[in-house]
Image (spheres, coloured by chain):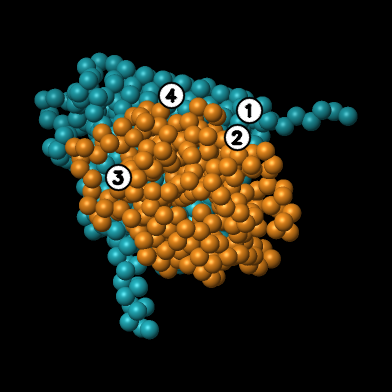
Amino acid sequence: MADLLISGLHVEVETETGPKEILKGVDLAVHTGEIHAIMGPNGSGKSTLAYALAGHPKYHITAGSAKLDGVELTELKVDERAKAGLFLGMQYPVEVPGVSVANFLRTAKTALDGGVAPKVRTWPKEVNAALARLDLEAAFASRSVNDGFSGGEKKRHEIAQLELLNPKVAVLDEIDSGLDIDAVKVVAEGINRYAAQGDRGVLLITHYTRILRYTTPDFVHVFVDGRVVEEGGTELAERLEVEGYEKFVKAAA
Amino acid sequence: MPNEITLPVLDSSGVEVVESHLHPKASYALDDHLAPTGKEEVWRFTPLSRIASLLDAKSAVGPLKWAWDNDGDLVDLTEFPDAPPDEPSSCHAGDSPSRHSARSRRIHLAGTTTATTFGPLTIADAKALGTQAPFDRVAAAAFNGATEGLSIDVPAGAVLDAPIVIKAVGENKPAYGRTHISLGAAASATIVFDYSGLADYAEYLDVTLAAGAKLAFVSIQDWQAGAVHGGQHSFEVGPGAELKSVTVTLGGDLVRLMETVRYAGEGGHAEMFGVYFADAGQHQEHRLFIDQNQPKTVSRVDYRGALQGDGAHTVWVGDVLIRRNAHGIDSYEANKNLILTDGARADSVPNLEIETGNIVGAGHSSTTGRFDEEQLFYLMSRGISELEARRLVVQGFFFDIIRRIGVPQVEEHLQDAVNAELTRAAEAEARTNTNEQRSV
């Protein structure tokens, strides 16, 4: 099961002039086996939704709920949300100098498996295979996490983690930004392999329709001014491609 | 109008004197180093009451328990026996008598055909070798008051396969060290000084690299609680020579080291790395003085520290002097401090004195802060607990330096030591939390 149910979610962020409300009542349901795309203009709150779900300390949930298979995420610490099955693929993955990718992946896997370390015999092979599927060399595992990675390497590393850690639900924030066309394909194929398991959920946050040519969403949501203003299928994404967000932005204003 | 010509003022060793409050004048004479009042720039960070035992100069103070760790077999270097009467000298042809005492031990280390010499070092020997004079009162007290002294001499051309590890153990009494290490031309060695035990230890340690020599020098202050260690580690880097120094301070009540580099010719290269970890009540002070006194010389300084607990105090001072003749030099120094808990204090003071603009580069950076929230969030978003995430970040912070040491057993030892410090921190935090819950 992988049901992510978001209802009435309000989120504030701290600013210099005091708290500012970014999410103004988000309702969204991602059911098992579904791929959802959230699209919207810059500043509409798409990334805020992703970070608030994962529990970033900068964002404060003031009202509403987000349940993953019945577990209320908003009451959990960041690591507990991951243990509940949530994964956040980040637009700007953070550099952690001196911590190798191999060490990071092993530590994360151990934590998610309730403190049981992955098997020494099979785990390195799994890691190498996952990296190879994302066009990353085995030597990549000995580099420091995101330190000195190119934009493309950072995003492919996020998807390699997605495949290795295999969460229930993946929230992928602008995973396609800053990628050339070949890298978009590699990343999209990784998402498709993950989704093809059939019992997972994907929430794909994107500004452009480009990645949706390779990863076909079941549902598309248009996000404007902190809430979902329109829902539909892939035809909605095609409409946005032609018409842009302007109509929705004007309607929301 | 007549041209004004200012002639440089030279000291007794021919080095131009630059008036500066940042780096006091070196002198062999104890009386030239007055007992500090605490108001001096170079002493203002130091709790004088806790280093008083090292400032109160005595005579005829014995050394630490020195031993050379010959692959697990400890060879005592504390006392050198008198030479047998029928063997008046173990010196070979070509060795100058003042350089190697008849009581020295000559040992062929792996990878060499010439002998490395371990021997005593008298005051007269040390001066005759053209060593750098003591920079402060603690080093001067040690230089003049130490009984025997220790010299290690790696001959020209010798390329040592294995590191020379010196175990220096405090035996719960005051100790003075007068030590000189020399590497002959094109010699290559790794030398590790591993300090442990309990002592009030004043140290003078001087290192000379001849032309083209390569030295990795590692100093690990792994003292027991209560130990006090002060003094100097001074390096002279010959033409085209390469020094890599790694200073690691973990234990002791107070450690205050003055680490200096000067060059004996063009093209010398010095990399100075430091790792320190201060717990509650510890004072750890590393004062670097890089004297870019020769053209086309290079220096890199990278010191990193973590602090945890009430009264943990670290001081890093990085002085770089670029003399007017030092054309084409390249210098960069960095210091980073990670403050893990409340009640800790890190002072970080980089200084550049530049007397010529005709250089490749000169820069510095200093950062002191708490955990990076974004790093913790990233790690935790993968299921890693906050405690484990902090541990990873600190390990990574230090590993960036540790991996550059190049001595596997030292690298492993330091990784373990950092982990042990973090475990202590976690336990202390757990205790605090329990107490807070109780008091609620």
Q: Is residue A29 above or below residue A117?
A: below
Type of amino acid at the residue the image marks with label 4 = Ala
Q: Which chain is depicted orange?
A: A
Query: Mark 1 — on which chain does it sit?
Result: B
Marks 2,3: beta carbons within 8 A = no
Residue B258 appears in the picture as rendered: no
Q: Which chain is depicted cyan?
A: B
Q: Secondary structure at mark 1?
A: loop
Query: Mark 3 — on which chain does it sit?
Result: A
Q: Are marks 1 and 2 on the same chain?
A: yes
Say which mark, if any, is on residue B362: 2
* Quadrant placement of the N terminus of chain B: top right
Taking depth in this image into account, of B101 and B134 the one nearest to the observer is B134
Q: Which residue is mark 4?
A: B241
In the rendered view, does B247 fall on the left or right side of A59?
A: left
Q: Which residue is mark 3?
A: A106
Q: Which residue is mark 1?
A: B359
Type of amino acid at the residue the image marks with label 2 = Ala
Residue A120 appears in the picture as rendered: yes
Q: Are marks 4 and 1 on the same chain?
A: yes
Type of amino acid at the residue the image marks with label 3 = Arg
Which residue is at 25% across, 24% downward?
B161
Q: Residues within 10 Å of mark 1 (few under 14, many from 20)?
A: some
Q: Nearer the viewer, mark 2 or mark 3?
A: 3
